[in-house]
Image (spheres, rainbow, N blue to C red):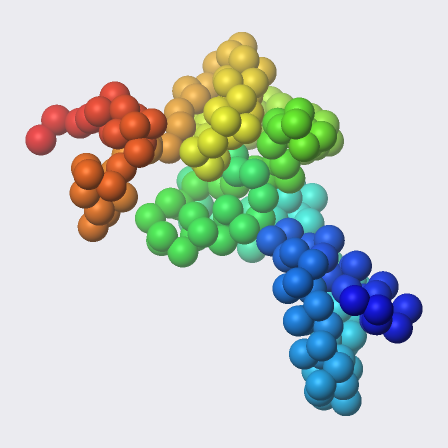
């Protein structure tokens, strides 16, 4: 479409966001313009606040306020220092916390191995992980990644890196989702469920 240049730039920027294609970016841009005095100003204000106030925690990589670094998950004395859950991004921390049953610490790698997409684990975050294992009384590292090829490669790589750190390395179990049936499970999920079977 032949949009005015500022509109084209806005659509282009919105389309860079994860999960947003060109058509969705166009609909978002049009939605903003329909309510230009309310929504655009609110969005500008929200983006400025995030830019000025939100940082990644210097210890774990979670999102936090500049005035609360390290974050509340790193400074909470009730959490278990012997457990360290390694995740891909801050969204994974939020999902783990929503479950409400994990009480250990976190470490966010801010990426995973994906040579096809030119992604890698952030070297700085990997170095911080190794430093934390040298300094903290961690007994178990839990690798909490998605169930895909890149995550499997990341897990294997991390297992190799952690081999001489004297910690137990575990991975989240994979299997048939609650409320689902065997008939709907793909072969990989079913194989993992069979491999990760537990006593009844």
Name the residue located 84 percent from the left edge and 71 percent from the top edge.
3
The quadrant holding residue 15 is bottom right
> Is any atom of residue 136 visible in this view?
yes
Q: Where is residue 177 in the image (x, y as percent from the top left)?
A: 27, 43
Residue placed most toward the observer, 197 or 61 = 197
Whether residue 33 sits left or right of residue 2 in the image: it is left
> Is any atom of residue 63 visible in this view?
no
Name the residue located 76 percent from the left edge and 85 percent from the top edge.
36
Residue sitting at the far front: 1
Total residue callouts: 0
Name the residue located 64 percent from the left edge and 39 percent from the top edge.
110
**In the rendered view of the protein, which quadrant contains the C terminus?**
top left
Compared with residue 171, is residue 89 higher up or lower down, i.e. above or below?
below
Q: Position of residue 122 (x, y in %)?
A: 70, 32
The quadrant holding residue 88 is top right
Name the residue located 43 percent from the left edge and 33 percent from the top edge.
147
The quadrant holding residue 181 is top left
Residue placed most toward the observer, 169 or 26 = 26
Residue sitting at the far right: 5
Q: Where is residue 149 in the image (x, y as percent from the top left)?
A: 50, 27
Q: Where is residue 144 in the image (x, y as percent from the top left)?
A: 45, 35
Compared with residue 31, is residue 123 higher up or lower down, i.e. above or below?
above
Compared with residue 136, is residue 96 higher up or lower down, i.e. above or below?
below
Whether residue 54 sits left or right of residue 95 in the image: it is right
Residue placed most toward the observer, 185 or 171 = 185
**In the rendered view of the protein, which quadrant contains the N terminus?**
bottom right
Residue sitting at the far left: 200
């Amino acid at each position: 479409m032949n949009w005015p240049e500022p509109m084209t730039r806005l659509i282009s920027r919105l389309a860079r966001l994860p999960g947003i294609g060109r058509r969705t970016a166009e609909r978002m841009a049009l939605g903003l313009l329909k309510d230009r005095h309310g929504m655009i100003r609110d969005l500008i204000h929200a983006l400025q606040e995030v830019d000025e106030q939100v940082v990644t925690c210097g210890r774990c990589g979670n999102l936090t306020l500049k005035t609360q670094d390290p974050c509340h998950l790193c400074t909470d004395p009730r959490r278990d220092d012997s457990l360290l859950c390694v995740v891909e991004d801050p969204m994974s921390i939020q999902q783990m916390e929503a479950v409400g049953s994990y009480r250990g610490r976190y470490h966010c790698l801010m990426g995973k191995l994906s040579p096809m997409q030119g992604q890698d684990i952030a070297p700085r975050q990997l170095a911080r992980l190794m430093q934390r294992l040298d300094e903290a009384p961690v007994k178990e590292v839990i690798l909490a990644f998605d169930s895909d090829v890149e995550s499997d490669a990341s897990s294997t790589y991390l297992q190799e890196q952690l081999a001489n750190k004297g910690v137990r390395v575990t991975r989240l179990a994979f299997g048939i989702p609650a409320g689902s049936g065997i008939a709907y499970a793909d072969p990989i999920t079913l194989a993992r469920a069979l491999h990760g079977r537990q006593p009844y």
